[in-house]
Image: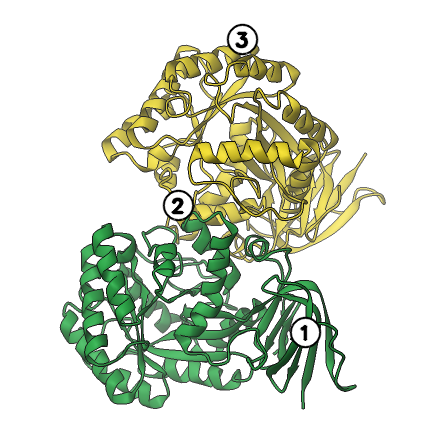
Chain colours: A yellow, B green
Amino acid sequence: MSQLLLKNIRPLEGDPVDLLAVDGTIQNISTGISPPSPDTTVIEGENRILIPGFVDCHTHIDKTFWGLPWQRHQAGPSLIDRIENERRLRREMKLSPETQSENQVRQAIRMGTTHIRTHVDVDTEIGLGHIEGVLATKERFKDYVSIQTVAFPQSGMLIRPGTVELLEEAIRAGANLIGGIDPCSMDRDPAGHLNTIFDIADRHGTGVDIHVHEPGMLGGFTLEMIAERTKALGFQGKVNISHAFCLGMVNAEYLNQLIDLLQENSISIMSHAPGYVAFPPIKKLFEDGVVLCSGSDGIRDSWGPYGNADMLERAMLLGYRSNFRKDEDLEMCLEIVTSGGARVMGAEQYGLEAGCRADFVLLSGETRTEAVVSRGKRNLVVKNGLITARDGDCLV
Amino acid sequence: MSQLLLKNIRPLEGDPVDLLAVDGTIQNISTGISPPSPDTTVIEGENRILIPGFVDCHTHIDKTFWGLPWQRHQAGPSLIDRIENERRLRREMKLSPETQSENQVRQAIRMGTTHIRTHVDVDTEIGLGHIEGVLATKERFKDYVSIQTVAFPQSGMLIRPGTVELLEEAIRAGANLIGGIDPCSMDRDPAGHLNTIFDIADRHGTGVDIHVHEPGMLGGFTLEMIAERTKALGFQGKVNISHAFCLGMVNAEYLNQLIDLLQENSISIMSHAPGYVAFPPIKKLFEDGVVLCSGSDGIRDSWGPYGNADMLERAMLLGYRSNFRKDEDLEMCLEIVTSGGARVMGAEQYGLEAGCRADFVLLSGETRTEAVVSRGKRNLVVKNGLITARDGDCLV
């Protein structure tokens, strides 16, 4: 029976208490807990803030260059340039999706992440190679981080014959969700694209997580199409839309119509706080009850050099890009990168209460907002009651 | 005679060399340098990247809450709300501008900064109190960081009678430049505002550094008015415009007209890469030959909670907000937060060549771009040949 006792920690910056986890579950949070046995691992929390483990709900761990010699960025500016550049580099560099995903997972653990949803490329050139690599990493790290995989047609689906069959094979091989990308602007057949992925999801009982970069009214149209299928198939609570830049571009009246569709169909939204393009109005969506999550998106890959797999930095960027200055708004950002993501991933027993899984991270800072803006070393990261990182070092 | 020898460092990521600094000046950069005397301080650089010290060319060190108990943010959304909130907090908290500026300066040194231009509030309520506090800090740290002060009418100038006289007193007391703020939207008299500050600058032989937040065509009009006065008074090379959001808002034709005015009058532009508002098109300005600098702006003050005084993070934000992905573009951002700022501050002998001041910082990372995106601990910070910070600790 493994026992972990944290002394003097402040859950969500509350008053100092102790926390006892037994066999991976939080058993007790109160003051003055004594170690139940001589074998109990006791950690002095020094009044640090305890929050539930970070949820990186949108990334691409199969494609990162993390751990490789530095690659100078070469892609042109368009989406298709970047996809073609990625395919070329993939051939030239002979990356191992297993090794690369493992590198990113270790970095994520260092930064306090306990849950990851990753999109994994599936196409006619690599087949299921990336899915297999990531599933191997998922298995190896199963005690240390919860990983969900999305079978993702990065290079287009209907426009590359054979991809649909591969996506379905990926689901059979163990991918958790079916992905999609820009049904109008990339696949040029929104109804065909969405019917295909919802059909696969329906037959296999999986959720859907679809990339929508399409701007303005075009993106809005795609969101309408997604909502129609979510409703028709009873997929409420099983659909996430990633990026949805259009929500930051349409007028207020149409935005409200789209939010109604998201709410009625329990469709969640992921934003990574892009640096340069409009993005969803976080606070309005949050206040209107839309479930929000965030993620690192690609980290140091052929798409760009940014990213540290640090969801605390992601919370900062969400706030910085949204012009949030009040503490309660940055606390909302912290909620998005923790419990928001957990809801999207359907993580059970997530939180800081007795009965919850012992998945948490200890942060420096007087308040949560200070933790977000200062982003110091993660003092302790725990998953399933096991210490996975300490003082910035990954221990697994 | 103080001697500092760095072994195996890579200036701007070039090939590994050694660097010898004697009495605060770089004497030699080449391979295989031996310590000239037994007293030479020798540092093993481990092939890290050496860059010139960071230049934080726009901040407000008199007003930071750094080092105080966390303050929850309370200001309303408008500029006037924020100014009034700041004035109220200033009265209630009884901040010491000397202590607070010292706290920020130490943090900046930890992060690799060797040069700071700070705007310092002057108004009818605090008089010269902030100027005096910052000048005391400037004197105390004179060997460790170069500080320029701008007498800044944060609360408005013509609209608060008595402010003009105080600004001139601030210059007499030792402030290096005269500041200004939104001549149209705040002071409601652009010609009066600009004539006043250019007159003070002209009579005292100082430069001008003016905040312009005004949007679109209004900001463009203010830039025209500034350029007219710069030309009339022969102030080329002595005027910096901070923020200049309007340059990111106007149409391409008018943007080119404004850039011509900036070039013809050697007016530099400061952008801190705001999170939420349009900002100057960095690459176009850079390529058109406009001198650019950047800064932290306010750090953890009544205006907002963000900021670490880390100019490497500022380079990342400039790139992230500009959608820069190529290495050469992030190298440009690094240039802006180093040599760009040095040009604006008129720092002499700045650079990594024999004869330059020994002001530099040692960074981890295989390349400059990796240093920008990963932003690790600063391994060594040197100012005037003195070690001011090591492994993230400020030593002065």
Instruction: Residue A303: tell me if it is visible.
Output: yes
The residue tagged with tag 2: helix, strand or loop? loop
Q: Which residue is labeled 2 in the image? A: A276
Q: Position of residue B69 (x, y in %)?
A: 50, 65
Left or right placement of residue A99 versus residue B53 in this view: right
Residue at 38% x, 57% y is B282
Relative to B329, does residue B147 appear above or below in the rendering?
A: below
Tag 2: amino acid: Tyr
Residue B110 appears left or right of A263: right
Q: Quadrant of the C terminus of chain A?
A: top right
What amino acid is labelled 3 in the image? Arg
Measured as percent of width and height from the top left, residue A274 is found at 43, 42
- Co-location on one chain, circles 3 and 2: yes
Q: Give the number of the disc on residue B30.
A: 1
- The CA span between labels 3 and 2 is 38 Å
Q: Nearer the viewer, residue B152 or A366?
A: B152
Residue lying at 43% horizontally and 48% vertically, measured from the top left = A319
Quarter holding residue B202: bottom left
Read off the residue under disc 3: A203
Residues A168 and B276: in front is A168
